[in-house]
Amino acid sequence: MSGFRAPRGTQDILPEEQPLWHYVRKKAEEICCNYGYGRIDTPVFEATGLFTRGVGQETDIVEKEMYTFNDRSGGSFTLRPEGTAPVCRAYIEHGMNSLPQPVRLYYLAPAFRYERPQAGRMRQHHQFGFEVIGDGSALVDAEVIRLAWRFFELLGLSRLSIVLNSIGCRQCRPVYLEKLKSFYEKNTDKLCPDCRVRLEKNPLRLLDCKQDKCQPLAMEAPGSVKHLCPDCLSHFELLEKYLAIAGIDYQISHRLVRGLDYYTRTVFEVLPEDKGSQSTLGGGGRYDGLIQEIGGRPAPAMGFAAGIERIILNLNRQGISVPALPRPDVLLAYTDGETRDEALAVSEGLGSSGIGSVLGREGSSLKSQLRQANNLGMKLAVIIGSDELREGRAVVRDLQKGTQETVSRKDLGLVLTASLNI
Ligand SMILES: [Zn+2]
Ligand SMILES: [Zn+2]
């Protein structure tokens, strides 16, 4: 046996798990089409600078989680750690700012982060995300939150909640950060070592520290919503009004700041009932400065992303069953070399009329071929023995009822279509 295994933090998605994956992807595509979003696929790797500039030097992703490599030309590339920066790069590269604004895009793509693997957190995971670029109005913020919420509803998930916050803009955030810093500076002895570093480098991240030691302070810390400039405040109030009209409930949490530097104003997350530190189903926010930061003409934008592994974890936890994938219902059984050749030809003929079939295993007895059909959950077996071959017939056996009939091979397609209700 080979000693190779899938790398730590990655997994094979086997055929029996695919119905769940198919279900989630299909619902994602369905709802995105309904809301007017177009799919975009970007490369799995990008120039490293896109993420150091776009996601931010001081973030966990850029500091410790990226899969970065040099290719043979010496260029530095990074496997996509998140989906937003690549979509923005494509928006700029393809001149999408000359299209009618806003541009609505969605993606389904793997993402790579060197993290400590745990349930629902993989080094290679898969994201569903969408972005609205070129419109700064609060109506767009509401649209993204609505779409995220309706997506989880469409999947059948229940007992979820939305947390919402506004972290302000370039004008009001520095003022707020000063307030936050002076609050924490009085209490440095009560902070974990990481947070003492954050206090200098990225004080906003003090609020979402997961260490027990830092919880009481974060609860007491001043909230950004109370320190918004008039524009950010009216944006936030409009968003609250639109969400009320849409009938979407949420809670405001001053501790929600999201881990990426590019967010401005609105940030939100969708959480399941059993909240744990890793339990967020998905999150997003507004990132009005990102397009300019990576070299485009300024364009406001708002987006959301969710991990498919975590969605599947929650579908399983909530016992949601999903439809099976289509599969063939017919096994073609035969008894010797000549009948095998005929079965092969019949299988091709059935295939061209849209009836899928599987051939019995070469060299196995009729009995074991029928057992194989049962094991595969087939509805029908078509048996061609030497008598049937000579007479232009075939035996059609209903494997569930245990009944069988002999039919002319030229009528086989019609008989099977009728029996299978195709
Ligand atoms: Zn502001
Ligand atoms: Zn801390």
Image (cartoon, rainbow, N blue to C red):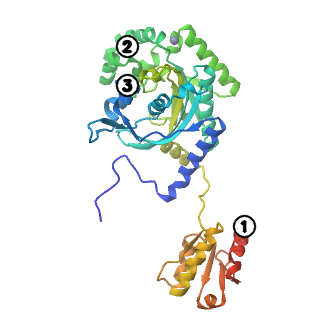
Q: Distance between the residues labelled 3 and 2?
A: 28 Å
Give x and y (percent) for residue 299. Answer: 52, 21
Camera-side mark, 2 or 1: 1
316, above or below 115, in the image: below
At horizontal 63% and vertical 20% (from top left) the residue drawn is 240
Q: Distance between the residues labelled 2 and 1?
A: 69 Å
Asked if disc 2 is less than 8 Å from ligand 2, the answer is: no
Whether residue 335 can be seen here: no
Kind of element beneath mark 2: helix
Q: Which amino acid does label 1 sit on?
A: Asn
Q: Which badge, 3 or 1, is on the more N-terminal residue?
A: 3
Residue tagged 3: 53
Q: Pointers 2 and 1 in contact (CB under 8 A)?
A: no
At horizontal 57% and vertical 80% (from top left) the residue drawn is 343
At horizontal 46% and vertical 23% (from top left) the residue drawn is 296
Q: Which badge, 3 or 2, is on the more N-terminal residue?
A: 3
Residue tagged 2: 184
Q: Residues within 10 Å of mark 2 (few under 14, many from 20)?
A: many
Residue tagged 1: 421
Q: Which amino acid does label 3 sit on?
A: Arg
304, above or below 109, in the image: above
Give x and y (percent) for residue 331. Answer: 58, 75
Q: Distance between the residues labelled 3 and 1?
A: 57 Å
